Amino acid sequence: MTTKRSEGETPGPPESEAEGEAPKEPTSENLAEEVAEALEDVGGFSLRVTLGSLAGLVAYFGEVVALLLQSVRALFTRGLHGGDLLRQMSVIGAESVPISLLTVGFTGAILALYTADTLRQYGAADLVGGVVALSIVRESGPILVAVSIAARAGSAMTAEIASMKVSEQIDALRTMALSPVEYLVVPRLVASLVMLPVVCVCADIAGVWGGYVVAAGFDIPATTYLSSIRLLMEPDGRDITQGLLKTVVFGGIIALVGCREGLETSGGATGVGRSTTRSVVIAIVLIFIANFFLSFLMKNANLF
């Protein structure tokens, strides 16, 4: 039988506490179980993210390869549109020459600025020209030319094709029985493959010349600068050839990524901007990745 609590009487502690039982404290076993569960959740989330990223990367690579195969098939079955090819060669090549010359030229000047001062301390200032030329033709020239063209021409490719996609002009091409790959991708791909080595040759010359201008300030004669280039570079021109072969691969990456992002655009003007940004970022990242593997193969496998 329960009794009513009188007015003003404060509630007492629970029966367990009233009887003197202390609240249970977490034991080490419970704490270990909680930590294990938390780590399991984090590990599962990380695994899902990693697998999802890998799956997305493989899918993207497959789409790019499929676009390349479609372009090759269209090139050999349908041929090229001469007017479109010349226009793309002008945009990718001729219009990209000034920025490439400035970028690589000043890079050669910076290389000479540091190498001349350092080599002079060790009595090897006569090798400045060779060091600058090797750095330019093997690595700096191809990479900087590819990045410059990806930022300038690659973004223009994506923006142009993406605008056509969101305005349904690509659907109109299909209605007229014209393949978007044949009409849009093939001219840009061929122009990139042809023009990037040409631009790279001009940029390499600018880089070596920029290095000489700075080396002359360290009282290094032109004859010494040129003789060191002949001394350190391969006489058969292998160094130059390897750099130009890299630009061919870089040109393919720029064109395929730019066209792929443009063809997959959706979402109006916002989608165009998003696709343009994605194309530049992805192309530059893939250029650096491809440069590592190409350099590794050329150095260790002696393929070229």
Image (cartoon, grey):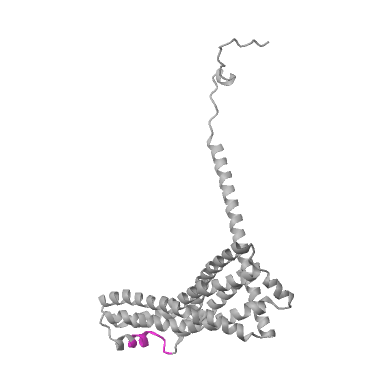
On-image quarter of the N terminus: top right
Q: Is residue 268 above or below residue 188?
A: above
**How far across and how far down the image is residue 288, in percent?**
50, 71
Residue 133 in view (yes/no): no
User: In the figure, is residue 257 to the left or right of 139?
Assistant: right
Residue 273 in view (yes/no): yes
The magenta stretch spans residue 232: yes
Q: Tell how many labels.
A: 0
Question: Based on the displayed image, in which of its 4 quarters is residue 67 positioned?
Answer: bottom right
**How far across and how far down the image is residue 278, in percent?**
56, 65
The magenta stretch spans residue 148: no
Kindly identify the residue that appears in the image at 60 percent across and 69 percent down: 261
**How far across and how far down the image is residue 296, in percent?**
49, 75
Q: Nearer the viewer, residue 159 or 145?
A: 159
Kindly identify the residue that appears in the image at 68 percent across and 69 percent down: 168
User: In the figure, is residue 14 to the left or right of 101?
Assistant: right
User: In the figure, is residue 275 to the left or right of 1?
Assistant: left
Question: Based on the displayed image, in which of its 4 quarters is residue 271 positioned?
Answer: bottom right
Q: Nearer the viewer, residue 175 or 211?
A: 175
Q: Is residue 100 above or below residue 27?
A: below
The magenta stretch is 226-235
**How far across and how far down the image is residue 239, in percent?**
44, 83
Q: Main secondary structure of the magenta part?
A: helix
Kindly identify the residue that appears in the image at 57 percent across and 75 percent down: 255
Kindly identify the residue that appears in the image at 62 percent across and 72 percent down: 161
